[in-house]
């Protein structure tokens, strides 16, 4: 037969199913948030590493302007510190995706697709390897080119030859940046098809694996040695986008995503802790008289504590039964979404045991630990105090400023400014200030996190604008080789719709460190310092270039991230075209993802043998709308080709901005998902807290009804109380979001840009959460209040 106290525990759990359900749900939503975030983060980290290792990733990629042959490849393979090397050919073409609409298409030609040694490509659908005069498309690129397997597409080669090709299948190439990120699709053909294009036989891309690939510095040393060997052999190294040694494409964004997920997981854990404290405190307040009765008949504090802790543990167990399966499903869904964004496969979706262990620990230990203080506070009261008729504020409303303002002492304010239901609601709200504080802490955390997520989103886009502020032009045209500045500008101005033209030099460089080692590729741009079309980026430290500067250089925050010893005023050594030159750092500009440096055109052109020449045109159009810019870009490219200026790429700045927004859309999407998840956590926590508040005041509802209050009036009292609490949490959360957003901006910015994001406060998040919290608070109070108001007066007055 059950002991009487355990019978009470069972009766409390089973007899009041509504209260039990509310408490269990309040704990479960916090556990769900923690489990989903932690599990997803672990799955993504593990599976990404596994998928990337399966392709035998290169330590780095070296591309050359001139093709090289098999003997040169074998000479690379026999280098001392090279473990493996493979080669392929890449050509930059265009693919038609609509009438008059073209996209740049990088096409790779591999000698033997079945025996690739480095950066392996996996078949997905259709033919394998690519049949002659047909093409395979990287799987993520199909949506970009708006085509399907079996379609025939029109491709234009660099010498303007057009070829119709059938899409014979799809492949998966994890070594390439996902096509949807930068709107750049990839295709794969055979060497025989390459000759059909009219391209000479040979390779122009080396994929090299260092003997110690896990050592990033050593891998970079090996790649630099390969570059030096290529340059000594007469090959030119162009400035192309390539991943750093040992990194997957967009690794910086992935690390920022994982960092944000970990941070939000910790915040969700704090949120769940306060949810537990709040619900347990409400339970104890409701059973205060029962505690007094038990103490009056001889129950010891330890026995009562053990009984209630057992009840809390059972609440935790029930919450785990709900939360664990849901978090498993949620983490799998979130992991699939993120994997699709980064274009990698999830071989397994096993939820890590440590994530479930964390949930169990949180579900069992945190409720117990969180309950100790409320239990200790409740058990300190005497039996006489506990058994008194249930009152708030120990028999009086209070003498504080807020109490006096809302009491009858201030009749003008109380009766003329406030409606009677609202006045009663406000007095009820502030009558139990301890419980109000707990509820506000929970909701304020949820509010601040939700608003902070929108602030980080706005800051991210603002930072992209700050980076692209340098590009005060509409189109960037890159040429296959340098041409005379006067010719470039004159031919550009001959194109209808072009208002202004300027030039710069862009060239790959490497930093030679004091110990003699060399950095990875740094992208150097050399505009005229006083150019109207190439403004200074947002300067973090120091200054921008001056027209009289010679060996002065402005470096990006990303370069500082890679080379943290560099400071403004330092003399650094940069290797340009195989020669080392000293430069003075005069400033640090905001950057994103890629390490960049900016030099003055006259000096850079002179030391590189390009005096009076440039390899890129900066063009401003008369009309800046997207359609006009695209039309002018197409006309520019065609005109340059007709006049003998070979174009490598022509990209509208708006398209570059859109690609940047898409690339960072992953982070934005994650933030929005987290915002919704945390809004659900906070909303359900509010509903649980308000519902328990209504339940424990069921007798008050009976008193109100006994003196003639209608059901609608009774419901309004509690609805207004919930809305007031929601509004207070919104105000406090809006303020707390300022430092929290700053911390998240710093963390995300340092991971992606080497500097904090440009802090921006998003009013959209503030007003959206206001709407959400008002609706939730009203709904949370209305449903239980309506149910309680339907009880008879006798039933509610007898309620315990």
Image (spheres, rainbow, N blue to C red):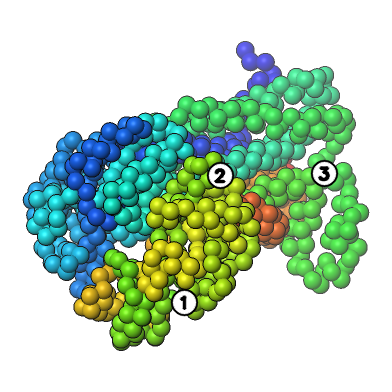
Give the spatial CA distance, label 2 vs label 3: 75 Å
Residue at image mark 3: 391
Dot 1 or dot 2, earlier in sequence: 2
Dot 2 or dot 3, earlier in sequence: 3
Q: Secondary structure at mark 2?
A: loop
Establish if 7 lies above or below 69. Answer: above
Q: Position of residue 221 (x, y in %)?
A: 43, 40
Mark toward the viewer: 1 or 3: 1
Tag on residue 514? 2
Tag on residue 533? 1
Q: Residue furthest top?
A: 1
Q: Secondary structure at mark 3?
A: loop
Dot 1 or dot 3, earlier in sequence: 3
Quick one: 411 or 680, which is closer to the camera? 680
In what quadrant of the picture does the C terminus appear?
A: top right
Q: Contact, CB < 8 Å: mark 1 with mark 2?
A: no
In the picture provided, is 177 more to the left or to the right than 365? left
Q: Secondary structure at mark 1?
A: loop
Mark toward the viewer: 1 or 2: 2
Whether residue 758 appears in this view of the structure is: no
Q: Contact, CB < 8 Å: mark 1 with mark 3?
A: no
Total residue callouts:
3
Q: Residue at x 37, y 54 (%)?
A: 241
Give the spatial CA distance, label 1 vs label 2: 36 Å
Mark toward the viewer: 2 or 3: 2
């Amino acid at each position: 037969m059950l002991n009487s106290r355990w019978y009470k525990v069972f009766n409390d759990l089973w007899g009041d199913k509504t209260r039990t359900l509310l408490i269990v749900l309040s704990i479960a939503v916090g556990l769900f948030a923690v489990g989903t975030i932690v599990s997803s983060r672990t799955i993504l980290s593990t599976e990404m590493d596994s998928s990337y290792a399966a392709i035998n990733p290169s330590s780095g990629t070296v591309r050359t302007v001139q093709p090289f042959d098999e003997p040169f490849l074998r000479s690379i393979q026999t280098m001392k510190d090279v473990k493996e090397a493979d080669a392929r050919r890449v050509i930059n073409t265009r693919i038609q995706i609509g009438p008059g609409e073209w996209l740049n298409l990088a096409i790779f030609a591999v000698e033997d697709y079945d025996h690739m040694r480095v950066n392996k490509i996996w078949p997905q659908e259709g033919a394998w390897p690519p049949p002659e005069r047909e093409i395979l498309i990287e799987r993520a690129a199909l949506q970009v080119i708006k085509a399907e397997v079996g379609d025939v597409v029109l491709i234009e080669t660099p010498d303007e030859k057009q070829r119709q090709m059938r899409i014979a299948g799809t492949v998966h190439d994890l070594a390439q940046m996902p096509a949807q990120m930068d709107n750049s699709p990839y295709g794969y053909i055979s060497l025989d098809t390459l000759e059909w294009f009219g391209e000479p036989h040979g390779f122009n891309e080396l994929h090299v694996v260092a003997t110690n690939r896990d050592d990033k510095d050593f891998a970079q040393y090996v790649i630099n040695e390969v570059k030096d060997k290529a340059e000594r052999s007469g090959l030119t190294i162009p400035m192309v986008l390539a991943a750093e040694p040992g990194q997957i494409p967009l690794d910086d964004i992935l690390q920022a995503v994982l960092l944000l997920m970990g941070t939000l997981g910790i915040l969700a854990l704090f949120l769940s802790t306060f949810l537990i404290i709040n619900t347990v405190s409400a339970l104890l307040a409701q059973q205060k008289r029962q505690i007094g009765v038990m103490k009056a008949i001889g129950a010891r504090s330890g026995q009562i504590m053990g009984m209630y802790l057992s009840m809390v543990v059972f609440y935790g167990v029930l919450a785990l039964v709900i939360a664990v399966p849901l978090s498993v499903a949620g983490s799998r869904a979130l992991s699939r979404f993120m994997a699709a964004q980064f274009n990698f496969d999830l071989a397994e979706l096993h939820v890590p045991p440590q994530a479930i262990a964390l949930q169990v620990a949180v579900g069992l230990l945190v409720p117990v630990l969180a309950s100790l203080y409320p239990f200790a506070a409740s058990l300190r009261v005497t039996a006489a105090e506990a058994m008194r008729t249930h009152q708030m504020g120990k028999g009086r409303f209070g003498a504080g400023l807020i109490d006096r303002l809302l009491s009858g002492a201030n009749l003008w304010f109380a009766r003329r400014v406030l409606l009677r239901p609202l006045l009663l609601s406000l007095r009820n709200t502030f009558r139990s200030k301890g419980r109000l504080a707990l509820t506000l802490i929970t909701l304020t955390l949820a509010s601040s996190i939700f608003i902070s997520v929108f602030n980080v989103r706005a800051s991210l886009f603002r930072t992209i604008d700050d980076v692209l502020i340098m590009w005060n032009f509409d189109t960037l045209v890159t040429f296959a080789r340098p041409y005379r500045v006067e010719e470039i500008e004159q031919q550009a101005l001959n194109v209808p719709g072009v208002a202004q033209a300027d030039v710069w030099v862009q060239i790959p460089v490497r930093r030679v460190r004091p110990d003699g080692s060399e950095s990875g590729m740094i992208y150097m741009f050399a505009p005229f310092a006083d150019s109207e079309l190439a403004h200074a980026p947002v300067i973090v430290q120091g200054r921008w270039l001056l027209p009289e500067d010679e060996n002065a250089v402005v470096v990006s925050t990303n370069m500082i991230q890679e080379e943290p010893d560099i400071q403004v005023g330092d003399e650094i050594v940069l290797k340009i075209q195989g020669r080392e030159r000293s430069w003075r750092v005069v400033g640090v500009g905001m950057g994103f993802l890629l390490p960049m440096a900016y030099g003055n055109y006259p000096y850079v052109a002179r030391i590189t043998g390009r005096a009076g020449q440039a390899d890129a045109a900066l063009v401003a159009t008369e009309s800046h709308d997207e359609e006009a810019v695209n039309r002018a870009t197409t006309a520019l490219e065609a005109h340059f080709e007709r006049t003998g200026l070979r174009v490598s790429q022509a990209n509208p700045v708006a398209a570059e901005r859109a690609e940047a927004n898409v690339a960072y859309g992953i982070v934005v999407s994650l933030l929005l998902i987290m915002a919704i998840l945390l809004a659900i956590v906070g909303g359900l926590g509010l509903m649980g807290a308000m519902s328990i508040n209504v339940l424990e005041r069921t007798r008050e509802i009976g008193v109100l009804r006994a003196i003639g209050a209608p059901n609608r009036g009774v419901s309004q009292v509690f609805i207004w109380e919930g809305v007031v609490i929601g509004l207070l949490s919104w105000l406090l959360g809006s303020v707390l979001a300022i430092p929290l957003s700053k911390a998240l901006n710093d963390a995300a910015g340092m991971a992606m840009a080497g500097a904090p994001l440009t802090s921006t406060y998003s009013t959209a998040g503030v007003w959206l959460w206001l709407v959400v919290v008002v609706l939730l608070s009203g709904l949370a109070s209305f449903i239980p209040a309506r149910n309680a108001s339907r009880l008879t007066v006798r039933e509610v007055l007898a309620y315990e």
